[in-house]
Structures are given as C-alpha cells and as structure tokens.
Amino acid sequence: MSSTETPAGNPAPAPSPASAPVSAQAQTPAPLPAADRRRWFALAIVMTAAFMDLVDVTIVNIAIPSIQRDAGASFSQIQWITAGYALAFAAGLITGGRLGDIHGRKRLFLLGIAGFTLASALCGFAANPEMLVAARILQGAMAAMMVPQVLSIVHATFPAHERGKVFGLFGAIVGLGAVSGPLLGALLTEWNLFGLEWRPIFLINLPVGALALVLGNRFISESKAPRALKLDLVGAALVTLGLLMLLYPLTRGRELGWPLWGYLSMAGALVVFAALVAYERNKAARDGSPLIELSLFRVKSFAAGIAVQTVFGVALGVFFLVWTLYMQVGLGWSPLRAGLTGVPFSIAVSAAAGVSVQKLVPRFGRKVLQAGALVMAAGVLVYIAESERYGLRIAPWQMALPLVVMGLGMGLIVAPLTDAVLSEVPREHAGSASGLINTVQQMGNALGLGLVSVVFFGVIGDRLTPAEVGPAFVNAFQHALVWVAAVLGVIFVLMSALPKRPGREAEGAGESGRAGAAGERPVVADRAGELVG
C-alpha cells in the first residue's frame, strides 16, 4: 500500500504544513474527492450493525419472564440465555479483530452480519430452551466477528479530520442502544405480535441484517493490514481460555453460592493471561504476527484509554443491572414503564456525545473527559438523594434530573474516549486494537456484574416478606450507587494519563514525528491519519 492511498483504496487528503511527513520516502497524499459519499453510506451500515449488537445485549433481559413462562426454561437456562451471548462475544472479540486484519474487514463484517442474522432466526424459532441457549452462543460468536470491524472500517476509511464527527455519531449510537434495548424489548413483548410472545425480539434482526448485508456489500470498501499476517491460533486459544476462566465464575458465582472452584478459576485466569503475554512477546519477535500487538501498549494514549475503558465498563455493569432490578422488582414497575423512564438518559447521552468530540475536545482536550466523569458522578449522587427522599413513591419524572445529568456525563466520555484510544494506532493493527477495546469493555462489564452480588445482593436479606422486598431493593440500590460514584472517581484519576489533546499527535502536530516502540522505525501520522515511515 502506498503512502498516498488509504487501505480502502481512496486517496487521502493532503496534510497540513505542520504535519508534513519527515520521512524521505513519504509522499504527499492526494486530496479526497469531495463527491465521494460512499464512505458515509458505509458508516450508516456499520453503525446499524453496532446498534443491533448493543440492543441485542440488553433486549433479552426485559423478556426473561415471558421466555421462562412460554418456553419453560429453568433459572439456569435463563442464566445461560443471557450469559452465553456475553461469554462467546468477549472470548472471540480479539480473534475477530485480527481475522479482519488478515482476511479483510469488509469480508469479516459481512460474514459476521450473515451469521448474526442466521443465529437470530434460530433464536426466534427455537423449539426448546436448549436450542435457544445454543443459538445465543452462536449469536455472540458472530457478533465477535462483526463488531471489531466497525471501528476498524471507520479507522481505515475516514481521514483524521473527519473522525471527530464520526466518533460523535458513534457515541450517540452507544447511548441510544444502551437504553432502547429494554424499551424495544418491552414493546415487542407486550404487543405479542402474531401471538409469538418473546420471539419478535430476535426476529426483528432478520430484515435489518438482510438489508445491511446487501448494502454493505455495495458500499463498504475492503481494507486489511498492508503486510501479510497469520492467525495466532495458540494466542486465540489462550485468550479464550483466560476469559472463560474469569467470566464464567463471575456469571454463575452468585447462583452457585460462590464455590471455591470459582475463585481458583479466576486466580488461574491471571496465570493464563501471564502466559499469553509471554507467548505473544515471543511470537512478535519470531514472525511479527501476534494476536495481540503488545507494542500498542507502549502508545500512552492507547494504554491509558484501555485502563479507563475497563474501569468505565465496571461502573456501567453495576449501574444498568441494579437500575433494572430497582425499577422492576423494588418499585414493581412494568417493563414498559421502566423502559420509558430511561429515555431522558438516552437523549442526554446522544446530545452530549455529538457536542463533545466536535466542539469541546478540540478546545479543552482531556478536561472534557474528566468533566464527564465528575458530571456523571454528580448525577449518581443526585439519584441517591432522590431515591432516599421519595422512597417507593418515586415517579419517573422525579428520576429525570439525575438521569439527564448522568447521561450528559456519559456522553462527554464515550465518544472522545474511543477517539483517544485509537488516535495513534497504526492502521495495520486497527482490527487488533478495536478487538481489545471491545474485549476490555466486556471484561469491565462482567466484573461489574460480579460486583453486583456484593454491593447489591449482599445488602439484601435472603428471606424477605413481600412487604420487605421494596424497601430492601431501594436501600440496596442506593448502596450500589455509592460504589458507582466511587468508581467514577477512580476513572477521573486515570484520565490524567490520557493525552492533553487526544488525537493531536495522530495528526502530525510534532515536527520530527513520533518515535515508534523500541526497535521499530520512527513513524509519523499525517492529517489523514495514515501512518507512513
């Protein structure tokens, strides 16, 4: 691939004088044709796929009572209907990202979309709970092929000066998907379309997936790593084993009474991850084709962003689960009422995400992300006060203020954080980096879900009378939110390690380029985000 061409085959815009390449071999990129609108159609398609995944993660929770009643599923099967997807998704993300680097991001994206749509059909037409569990695991595995390609395609298709707008849209989609899943699930379940009970929550993916498959084949440009890579099967096996050893006990621990083997498994996962690091370092030196590009962690913005992303996932994992339990079990609200209550949160996230990247971050840098953590923590504290003040009599409109404040804070974080993590990542490792971002987010969520057993259920007694359930859940909700606020404080501190101006280095602000990792050639990023050396 020449230095004047993006991996998608489109010429890159010319860099600004301040970002002119210093390499003697670098050539000035040609300007991107203004009439080229294909990339915006491609963006709409990959964003639709990302939205499908975000919704599918949460849509099932709202329909669990209907699934249990209609399909006769046991509690353990219900657990696996939700956990099977998350486990397969988290375990396959890094491998999915690397497969996109090797075989082409468009090809893997389309394969993931096709598989995800097929798995959704199998879920919708499942004849028994066992088939539903298997189909959900397949759905998670296909999502692991599809989702890493989303950020990779964006990173490889859009020049750096346009990515702020793109990541703003991405943050808006994240906010919308986080809340619209339960709302959409509530509507589809209560409408009972064609007498299908819960099945439409899966079948709705069929027309969306088919349309995305047709349009994606037409509008998405192919891109892959510029040099030949090989799939690291041993690394993939170690990643999968380590994540399963960590996430399976966290998922099943409370149900099984936190057995000793669960703690041993989680401790063993640390050993597996240590072996993975040693193996990947050796493989990088041997053939330069590791599954996880450890050199990425020498890039300060990437390493710091990954840490923030993980801890942020913990906060979200705790909040969204206890929030749902608080409204539907503690307050006794219907799924639809609970889903509608989250609409102000979703709107606030979407609005703040768009403004943060396009207007605020270019002017204030990482202070925007730090402000987001503080604003979100303030919203959490207001929510605690509102819950304590009104108790079981609290109404949805009384939750609107804290939810809007929390949503604004989250919106200030999600979009610029993604930009900060990927801003200095070489394009040949975009898939691996994207897989790592999604994987650590899923790991953070799983850790948050595990903490729920301590910070929420640990406060609730084992045997409650019907009259005690509401007050107990309200008290546990307030207790859990104190922990969420504390985690957001930790995030604020970690954000001090992010670049003061996320993305500036990637746009070639330096005069002499940015040195690569030890033993690598110096590289410099021009305004289009294309790395040349």
Image (spheres, rainbow, N blue to C red):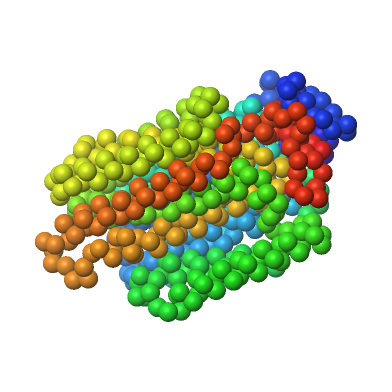
Where residue 518 appears, as percent x and y from the top left, is 77, 50
Q: Is residue 415 left or right of residue 387?
A: right
Can residue 233 be seen in this snapshot? no
The residue that appears at 75% across and 28% down in the rendered structure is: 511
The residue that appears at 39% across and 71% down in the rendered structure is: 253
The residue that appears at 21% across and 38% down in the rendered structure is: 398
Q: Is residue 306 left or right of residue 323?
A: right
Where residue 49 appears, as percent x and y from the top left, is 54, 44
Q: Is residue 300 left or right of residue 469?
A: right
Q: Quadrant of the N terminus?
A: top right
Q: Is residue 504 depicted above or below 59 in this figure?
A: above
Q: Nearer the viewer, residue 339 or 514?
A: 514
Q: Is residue 26 depicted above or below 487 in this figure?
A: above
The residue that appears at 75% across and 20% down in the rendered structure is: 17
Can residue 382 be seen in this snapshot? yes
Q: Quadrant of the C terminus?
A: top right
